[in-house]
Image (tube, rainbow, N blue to C red):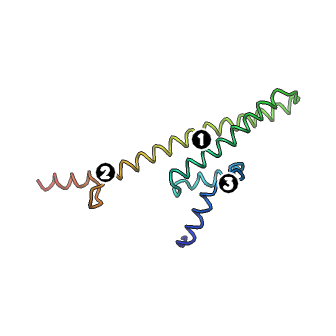
Amino acid sequence: ALTAAGRRALLERLNTFEEKEAQSTEEFLLRVGLFDLLEPAARQHILDARQQVLTGREEHFARLQQVKLGVYGGEVVGFLRQRVNDELIWLRRLRHISAHDLAINAASETGRTARGRPAAAQHAKQRSMS
């Protein structure tokens, strides 16, 4: 279990996602694995930064494919470009999941009554008392 100070330090580190971290697959995957701990704005920032890196890589690989690389060099560049495109597709899926989670959380918050009880549970209790 983390102490309060340890949790704050972890969250501070996870929320730091500059170009250096965005370039690193490991740094990115670590943060995605811990998205449940992060605020939606931090998630969005991480996804945006990674997308910017991947878009740059995709453009670089597209230019490389215009050069005569030989059979194997072309295979490597094609493979790397496909990995980038696969990750870009995954980023869209992560955005969708994050938006869905945000909508569920917003709905559950608006479904709570002033006493902190879910509205559906309060309505069920009122029905049983009638």
Taking the image as shown, residue 80 lies to the left or right of residue 89, namely right
Q: Residue at x 58, y 53 (%)?
A: 33
The residue that label 1 is drawn on is 91
Taking the image as shown, residue 15 lies to the left or right of residue 109, namely right
Q: Residue at x 54, y 73 (%)?
A: 3
The local secondary structure at tag 1 comes to helix
What kind of residue is marked 1?
A: Leu
| Figure quadrant of the N terminus | bottom right
Question: Horizontal and vertical percent for residue 47?
Answer: 60, 45
The residue that label 2 is drawn on is 111
What kind of residue is marked 2?
A: Gly
Classify 78 as above or below 29: above
Classify 79 as above or below 99: above
What kind of residue is marked 3?
A: Glu
Q: How far apart, in angstroms, are the residues tagged by discs 1 and 2?
A: 30 Å
Q: How far apart, in angstroms, are the residues tagged by discs 3 and 2?
A: 36 Å
The local secondary structure at tag 2 comes to loop
The local secondary structure at tag 3 comes to helix
Question: Horizontal and vertical percent for residue 21?
Answer: 69, 53
Classify 23 as above or below 87: below
Q: Are marks 1 and 3 in contact (CB under 8 Å)?
A: no
- Going from N to C along the chain, the mark reached first, 3 or 2, is 3
Q: Residue at x 72, y 52 (%)?
A: 20
Q: Residue at x 67, y 35 (%)?
A: 85
- Going from N to C along the chain, the mark reached first, 1 or 2, is 1
**Mark 2 neighbour density, 10 Å: few (under 14) some (14–19) many (20 or more):** some
The residue that label 3 is drawn on is 27
* Nearest to the observer: residue 35 or residue 43: 43
| Res 27 quadrant in image | bottom right
